């Protein structure tokens, strides 16, 4: 397993226009983190490795966050079944 790395240039703050910053004000960091994780999982079709890499966190950290969310009754996007179904078919043989 690889290690997730933060974005290359962390010296500049995230460029947020006024409308985005206004939407964030008044929410806790935990709320914003939850939304960001869930939306990233949706964008990656539930692929936790890609989501963790995009977020700049380890897969273990993402898995722990997902576990916390599930305990709170929050729905988490599932991995895309199409990819899994390919490999569950015993006749499936990927071309090399």
Image: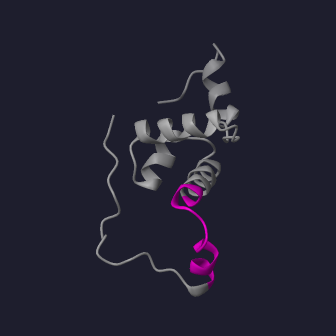
How many numbered badges does the structure rendering display?
0
Judging depth in this view, the residue of 1 and 60 nearest the camera is 60
Residue 72 coordinates in the image, percent (x, y): 65, 38
Q: Position of residue 71 (x, y in %)?
A: 62, 33
Please identify the quadrant where the N terminus is shown.
Answer: top left
Instruction: Please provide percent x and percent y for residue 94.
Output: 54, 27
Most extreme residue toward the top is 90
The answer to whether residue 87 is above or below residue 78 is above
Residue depicted at 56% across the width and 34% down the height:
67
Q: Start and end of the magenta stretch?
A: 19-32
Give the residue displayed 66% in from the left and 17% down from the top: 89
Q: Is residue 5 above or below residue 13?
A: above
Residue projecting furthest to the bottom: 18
Quadrant of the rendered image containing residue 27 = bottom right
Q: Nearer the viewer, residue 96 or 70?
A: 70
Foreground residue among 32 and 6: 32
Residue 86 in the figure: left or right of residue 29: right
Q: How is the image coloured?
A: one colour
Q: Which residue is rendered at x = 46% and y = 54% of the image?
A: 55
95 falls in the magenta region: no
User: For residue 85, which quarter of the picture?
Assistant: top right
Q: Residue at x 52, y 29 (%)?
A: 95
Q: Is residue 22 above or below residue 93?
A: below
**Magenta span: helix, strand or loop, mainly?**
helix
The x, y position of residue 24, in whole percent, is: 59, 72
């Amino acid at each position: 397993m690889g290690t997730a790395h933060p974005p290359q240039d962390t010296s500049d703050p995230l460029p947020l226009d006024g409308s985005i910053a206004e939407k964030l004000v008044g929410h806790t960091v935990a709320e914003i983190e939850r939304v960001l994780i869930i939306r990233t999982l949706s964008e990656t079709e539930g692929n936790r490795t890609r989501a963790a890499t995009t977020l700049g966190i380890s897969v273990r950290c993402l898995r722990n966050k997902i576990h916390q969310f599930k305990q709170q009754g929050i729905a988490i996007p599932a991995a895309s079944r199409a990819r899994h179904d390919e490999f569950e078919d015993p006749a499936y043989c990927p071309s090399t």
